[in-house]
Amino acid sequence: MSQTIAHKTLDGPALESLGPVTSEEARLLEKLDLTRLPRHVAVIMDGNGRWAQKRHLPRIAGHRQGTQSARTTIETCARLKIEALTLYAFSVENWRRPKTEIDFLMQLLREYLKKEMPLLQKNAIRMRFLGRIHELPAAVQKDVREAMEKTAGNKGMVLCVALNYGGRAEIVDALNAVLREQNGSAAPSQVSEERISRHLYTEGLPDPDLLIRTSGEMRVSNFLLWQIAYAEIFVTETLWPDFNRARLLEALVEFQKRERRYGGIREGHPNTEKPARVAGE
Ligand code: FPP
């Protein structure tokens, strides 16, 4: 991190676990209400190529630097006790990139899973992978399976890596699973939101309440289309390799400024016990 370390550790177990913070981070942490953090943060990590281009480096240098931002984001979210973090690492559309770049990204992920296993274990992180994993190269599938197995008993944050992921493909997969479940059943078929959610790759996780996208693009890029129905969207101009802890805290502070109404007129999700009062009531 390039900023001056102020060596200020704020009070409270969650903040203490962040260790030394910069003066900028300390200012942001003071504004953050730890009781109102998002339960699930999803991130579109964009801008690796542009980061490299600005430095006259090959695109892959941007991806490599991007793993540092992934590390910081994962560790900070885990220490703040956020329930789930989803990182968009490789989309179904990314197969259109040059083979050398695809091979590099797959290799980088494999290296990452090996190198970062101690960090994942130390922070009690449980790994999940979202996407058509069975279509990935066999070696990647093996590493993905191993990472899930090694962290299966962890009770901390769930880290989801979206890999060969597409939001539309996920909905198609969910509906096909519903159809398979229906076969052989005499009961009349009924699809409900709950039933579809149960067959999504994110089954059992809360929907993301905060979606962060780096590098300034105003698109959702086929990411968690079903799950982001009520998410707050935070777009920063920062390119992913420059996304540090202060930028993450900034996104969390911004999230807490938003008034979440879910179509009603005050806080309260339509699917929770706390009902939203609807306009006109
Ligand atoms: C988007 O930047 C980034 C990706 C397609 C890959 C993201 C992968 C990583 C950050 C590394 C591995 C991640 C993990 C979880 C270990 P881009 O190439 O589209 O950038 P550009 O829009 O500037 O060209």
Image: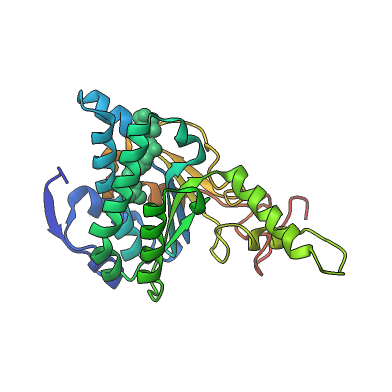
User: Which percent across, then down, holds residue 275?
Assistant: 68, 64
User: Which percent across, then down, holds residue 216?
Assistant: 41, 31
Q: Residue furthest front?
A: 138
Residue 198, compared with residue 87, is above or below; it is below
Q: Is residue 157 left or right of residue 172?
A: left
- Give the image's coloring scheme: rainbow
User: Which percent across, then down, holds residue 230?
Assistant: 60, 50
Q: Is residue 178 left or right of residue 222?
A: right
Task: Let me know if residue 178 appears in the view.
Answer: yes
Q: What residue is rendered at 41% in x and 63% in y?
A: 145
Quadrant of the snapshot with the C terminus: bottom right
Q: Is residue 205 left or right of residue 253?
A: right
Q: Decide which of 211, 110 is in the foreground and name it.
A: 110
Question: Ligand 1 appears in which quadrant?
Answer: top left
Residue 67, compared with residue 49, is above or below; it is below
Q: What residue is rendered at 53% in x and 64% in y?
A: 205
